[in-house]
Amino acid sequence: MNSGIVSNWSKAPLRVPWVVICITMASLLAKLAYAFLTPLEQQIMIEAAGAAPKTTAMMLSHPLRDWLHSGLSTLFTALFVHSGWAHLLGNLAYLWVFGVKVEQRLGALYLMAVFFLGGALAHVVVALQLPQLETPVIGSSGAVSAVVGAYLGLFPSSRIGLFLPLGLYLQFARVPALLVIGSWFTLQLVYSAFGPITGAVAWWTHLAGFVLGLMFAMMARAWAQFGKN
């Protein structure tokens, strides 16, 4: 992408990040509802809303017209179910850090496509890699990874403001986005490489989402280049 297109994106008017806000509110409401359920009810909620790779793999073997009745909706409902607060808040933190700028620059529809399609396709990739896994996969890790990948593809040279601990004080610094995302991606790789089976699921979810997000960014860049010409 040439500098002219980058300049046009950087000068785009700021928008209220309604999609990020709505995703955040829906995720928090789902977590609060989960917290008030009994352990048995929580398990029922996970099994009903989670995306089990085996179920998804079976759905893919059916004709496209039968997908709606074979578990297609769980590819999206799973994005809003989190069993732990740390899992949820970690995903929301990355969504706000990277998703707000993507939405402000390219609009709500683009971010919705990245989040929902990226998250759903990440579950599909997990199903293709672990087709016999019956445990439902929940959380927005794949969707948020897609947002992170899209951010890197769109704004590879940008800097992110962070508060870094220096002894007893916090120092504000603007860190290259590539360094922040690279560090995050490395941590996901290390955890997944040495983790149990859930680590394998996490690895494929993060990797698939991240790559899909990059692909969305490349498509946006190509479209911007086409419109410029």
Image (spheres, helix red, strand yellow):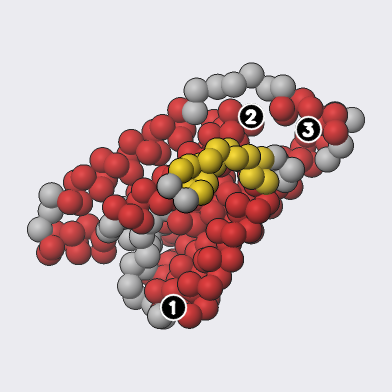
Locate residue 88, reporting x and y percent: 35, 51
Do the CB atoms of the residues marked 1 and 3 lie less than 8 Å apart? no
- At label 3, the amino acid type is Val
Of circles 1 and 2, the one toward us is 1
Q: In this view, does 190 lie to the left or right of 136?
A: right
- At label 1, the amino acid type is Gly
Disc 3 element: helix
Disc 2 element: helix
The alpha-carbon separation of the residues under discs 1 and 2 comes to 37 Å
Q: Identify the residue shown where x is 86% and y is 37%.
A: 2
- First in sequence: mark 2 or mark 3? 3
Q: Can residue 17 be seen in this view?
A: yes
- First in sequence: mark 1 or mark 3? 3
Crowding at dot 2, Cα within 10 Å, few <14 / some 14-19 / many 20+, comes out as many
* Label 3 sits on residue: 6
Do the CB atoms of the residues marked 1 and 2 lie less than 8 Å apart? no
Crowding at dot 3, Cα within 10 Å, few <14 / some 14-19 / many 20+, comes out as some
Residue 221, placed above or below residue 213: above
Locate residue 49, reporting x and y percent: 30, 56
The circle on residue 105 is 2
The circle on residue 195 is 1
The alpha-carbon separation of the residues under discs 1 and 3 comes to 39 Å
